[in-house]
Amino acid sequence: MTKLGRQLGIGPTDNTSDQRTPRKRLRLIPEAVRESFVPVVPARAVTRQYEWDMTRISPDLPRADGDAIEVSGTLRTADGKPVRGALLEIWNANHYGRYRHVEDHSGLKLDENFFGMGRVLTDYDGTYRFWTISPGAYLARPDIGRWRPKHIHLSISGGPVRLITQMYFPDEPNNATDPMAILMGDAFGRNMGKPYATPDIDVDQGYRFDIVAGGRNATFFE
Amino acid sequence: MSEEQRANALLPTNEDTCGPYFPIYFGDDSLEDLTRIHSGVVAGASGQHIILRGRVLDRHGNLAHGVVMEFWQANAMGIYRTPGTEGHPDIDPWFSGYGRLRSHSGEYSFCTIMPGPAPGRAPNITVTLFSDGINRIVTQLFFADHPANDGDPLLLGLDPEDRDRLMARRDGTAAAGAEIYRFDIVMAGDNETPFFDDLES
């Protein structure tokens, strides 16, 4: 019999998590086939020139509503090596908590100057940087009054590095009750942007978010 | 990793759900059909074209709408394109082996080529799911009735019911000659698909 791995947690008050989280413990992968479980994402240059600045739809159009922020940091593997040329696909809600996604039926206000999706690549030293609008929190469970705290989604792929994560904001009142934050427990702080001042650039606030791709896959071919 | 490297390892960023709004805008046709590079370009992968079709279902048997699926497989010669196979004579220059799609409804269709058997393995495709409510879950599908299934080390470690749950089954031929295979994934509950732990393994 295959030996057993993790039992995945179900996010409290998250109905979708209850519907979609496997109930059986994950199976460990036999060493003889371990390599086949390491997808290697090919480098795809699909960023567009202005996508790093999500505070406006294009350079000739006005700024969106809300606070402009910079998010910057490094992408490294757990052994500290920078991950070069990785693709970061970024999306976040607008100032009012609305996504420009055809399946967002929340009815919250759309901002005609905010697109909410962008892509950047990490540099030679694994650093990245983008600008966006500080997202609004939104009511995820009106029936029990649970909000999703402000967050920015990041989907990261580069060679054997593959993770989807979210950056959260410090001192937000809804952080403590977020199902995903609860599942992360003490490790939640690792997903927190660290504020820095931005006196020399045209944004209101900076957040440093250093990303570490864990797990064996990320370093499998080193 | 050595003990020392393990002790010095950086703490990993938590994986998190992609939520319900993974941008459809980030879709890429060339990742949903690995048999060709682009309709206007004379180039394509070698091998038998196949279409993988199926449904992703939740604990109640409902379609898992908004699911993001990623696929990873060897080329027709059984070679994975990794840093370890660089320069291998059987690399197919027009086949990366990585696919991705987002399904609005929870039903999916993915065009690719039949993977060849890697050494010691039965032909297989690794499938990664991202969706609202979960972070990332991983499984591997096989092709029913392939003779190499009987000796595959992953399948041999599973009981017969779970082995059966990883089988894509032939379901006819498309007009252009592609073989159609059906593979449903049950994320949770009765008849749950076996998922594998690539963090603890």
Image (spheres, coloured by chain):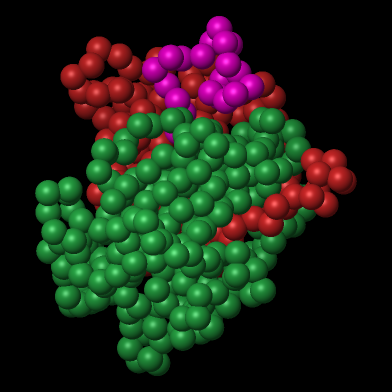
Chain colours: A green, B red
Foreground residue among A3 and A93: A93
The vertical placement of A60 against A160, above or below, is below
How many marks the image carries: the answer is 0
Which residue is outermost to the front? A200
Q: Position of residue B102 (x, y in %)?
A: 33, 50
Whether residue B134 is visible here, answered yes or no, is no
Q: Position of residue B62 (x, y in %)?
A: 37, 67
Q: Magenta stretch containing residue A51, yes or no?
A: no
The vertical placement of B13 against B6, above or below, is below
Whether residue B122 is visible here, answered yes or no, is yes
Residue at 65 percent across and 68 percent down: it is A187
- In-image side of A108 versus B170 (left or right): left
- In-image side of A118 versus B100 (left or right): left
Residue at 74 percent across and 41 percent down: it is A30
Foreground residue among B187 and A100: A100
Q: Position of residue B151 (x, y in %)?
A: 70, 30
Residue at 64 percent across and 75 percent down: it is A185
Which residue is outermost to the top? B89
Foreground residue among A198 and A186: A198
Residue A45: image quadrant is top left
- The overriding secondary structure of the stretch rendered in magenta is loop
Residue A99: image quadrant is bottom left
Residue B176: image quadrant is top left
Q: Quadrant of the C terminus of chain A?
A: top right
Which residue is outermost to the bottom? A144
Q: Which residues make up the magenta segment? A: B79-98
- In-image side of B38 versus A198 (left or right): left
- In-image side of B54 versus B135 (left or right): left
Q: Position of residue B77 (x, y in %)?
A: 53, 16
Q: Magenta stretch containing residue B84, yes or no?
A: yes
Residue at 87 percent across and 46 percent down: it is B3
